[in-house]
Amino acid sequence: MQRKKKKNKKLILDATEKLISAKGLVNITMEEVAQEADLATGTLYLYFKNKESLFAAINARFNKDMNQAIKKKMDLYETGSEKVVATGTAIVEFCLANPQKWKVGTELHQMPFEDVEDLNVQEFFHTANDMIHMLADAYRQGMEEGSIHADLDPVSTAIFSRMAFINSFTLTSEQKMLLQLNEIDREHYLSVSWNLINRSTHVKPSLREEGDIPLEYHRSEEEIGREIKTMVDSLGLPADDAVQIRDAWKMVAQITMGKGEYDFVETTKSRCVVHVNFCPITTSYEKTKRPVDNNMIEGCKRFGKILVETLNPKYTQRFTKQLCAGDDYCECIIELKED
């Protein structure tokens, strides 16, 4: 009897998922679900008292499957920072491997569940909260290890990160058009979204991770250039002259490295000089009590040059002073390349 109940419930959930994927939420009736599941309509009401209860059960199953994928990915890593990043990777992989489930999950994501006494609604809430606390535990561990900002509230941060990332899957018509026009595939866009979320919480931003390894193992110019181009295209940043390049450079630098403090010393359309008085990368090294070595100094120079030349190949960038090399500020010069 128990086995039959379990089988019938699975039939109902599978049928509902299929109908939601094909028709959306609005026009589905319990009679249609029963017909799709090849069961009597009355049988549905033995398991679910109404559509809200049924949809909550679908959502709970979706969350359980995704939580399992996240835990499996998290278990491959040791540090809190790595586990946070692994969460996003697991979500992307789950979405791409289960397009129907993901479509249904994002449909149901917009639905309010009001009957908090219903057992299926309660299970949905619990499974959603399970993911939040897995992620919050990873943030908490990272805070203790010094890789994630210590002043964050781990649970609130986990709730925001989950919502922000999942919302990036639910694209508007305009977003879809922009991605298509700029030839950006969905997987790469999701990767960029998750990286931006991570960089807002991590003490050590991502270019910065390359500062811990020898220069010969840093990413290629092409790989860094592709990452920058994706950001620039998605933000719609102009870069026709040195002033526009400087403004775009500042925005991309803040996304990839964190918020700095800048003085614009010289400004013409062919040449701009910027003084960076506060560098989040140098500060991250100080907070984690790590010495800044040549890998970081040269890696930062390289990244800045690639950034500007990706924005506009007619221009280049060089540093004449660097905070991480012991100077009082970084002096960055953006200028036209010599003929």
Image: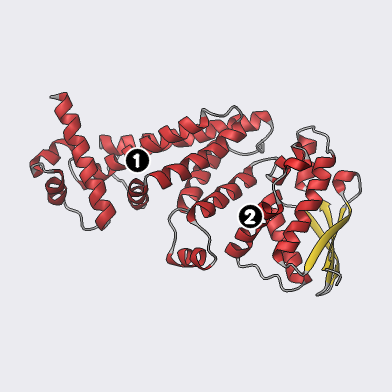
Number of the label disc, if any, that sits on residue 146 = none
Residue at 49 percent of width and 33 percent of height: 73
Residue placed most toward the observer, 305 or 245: 305
Please state the horizontal and vertical placement of residue 196, each as a whole percent of the image: 60, 50
The reply to whether residue 139 is in sight is no
**Which residue type carries mark 1?**
Phe
Residue on which disc 1 sits = 62
Name above or below for residue 249 compared with residue 295: below
Q: Residue at x 37, y 51 (%)?
A: 106
Q: Which class describes the residues within 10 Å of circle 2: few (<14), some (14-19), or many (20+)?
A: some
Quadrant containing the N terminus is top left
Q: Quadrant of the C terminus?
A: bottom right
Could you tell me residue 154's position as x and y percent? 56, 36
| Circle 1: element type | helix
Q: CA distance from mark 1 to mark 2?
A: 31 Å
List the residue tagged with mark 2. 227
